[in-house]
Image (spheres, rainbow, N blue to C red):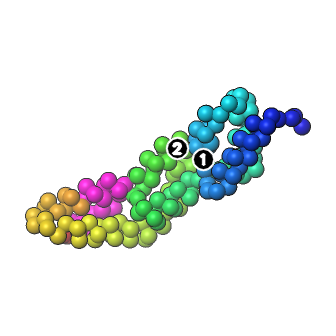
């Protein structure tokens, strides 16, 4: 077993705690290590160790990200996908994580956001303008037009 420097052991310990606190992805760890004084080989050893010890798992991170953003922030699939791409998660992992979305809960979130936005637009008298504002808002939250129309925005 090779002997490692105190800096190496300290960085490894910090990153283990960082990953244990909440799910992290490889990109976040690489970003943290980019400012470290460790050599590239030592950085690779740390990342490999975190992966091997299950402190780090991109699939688990993607699953938690999808669940949290959908349930808490009520984001749509497009915005969630963009967020995961910004963390440099593989597309296959993203698609697998997005398949875990409960379609009923997803549409309920969309309907809730639509009702909330409609209530805020009570001062807008023109129905067309109101409809456009609602659709723009929902698209900005990451929902597709087909999902928006499926919930009945065209009826308003």
User: Which percent across, then down, holds residue 140?
Assistant: 32, 53
Q: In this view, does 135 lie to the left or right of 126?
A: right
Count the marks: 2
Q: Is 83 in front, or is 106? A: 83
Left or right of 76: which side holds 95? right
Disc number for residue 25:
1
Q: Quadrant of residue 38?
A: top right
Q: Dot 2 lies on which element?
A: loop
Q: Position of residue 138 (x, y in %)?
A: 30, 59
- Write down the region rendered in magenta: 135-154
Q: Does the magenta stretch include residue 136?
A: yes
**CB under 8 Å between discs 1 and 2:** yes
- N-term mark: 1 or 2: 1
Residue 103: image location, x then y, percent:
44, 67
Looking at the image, which residue is at 40% across and 58% down?
Answer: 76
Q: Mark 2 points at which residue?
A: 87
In this rendered view, identify the residue nearer to me: 26 or 90: 26
Is residue 146 at least partly visible in the picture?
no
Q: Position of residue 89 (x, y in %)?
A: 55, 44
Determine whether, in the image, residue 16 is placed left or right of residue 95. Answer: right
Q: Does the magenta stretch include residue 54?
A: no
- Up/down of 119 relative to 82, above or below: below
């Amino acid at each position: 077993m090779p002997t490692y420097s105190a800096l190496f052991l300290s960085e490894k310990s910090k990153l283990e705690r960082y990953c244990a606190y909440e799910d992290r992805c490889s990109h976040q760890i690489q970003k943290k290590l980019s400012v470290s004084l460790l050599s590239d080989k030592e950085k690779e050893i740390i990342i490999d160790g975190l992966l091997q010890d299950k402190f780090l798992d991109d699939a688990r991170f993607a699953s938690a990200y999808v669940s949290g953003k959908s349930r808490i922030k009520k984001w749509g699939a497009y915005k969630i996908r963009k967020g995961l791409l910004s963390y440099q998660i593989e597309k296959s992992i993203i698609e697998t994580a997005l398949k875990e979305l409960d379609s009923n809960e997803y549409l309920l979130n969309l309907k809730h956001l639509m009702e909330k936005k409609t209530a805020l637009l009570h001062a807008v008298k023109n129905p067309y303008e109101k409809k456009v504002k609602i659709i723009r808002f929902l698209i900005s939250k990451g929902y597709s037009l087909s999902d928006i129309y499926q919930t009945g925005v065209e009826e308003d």
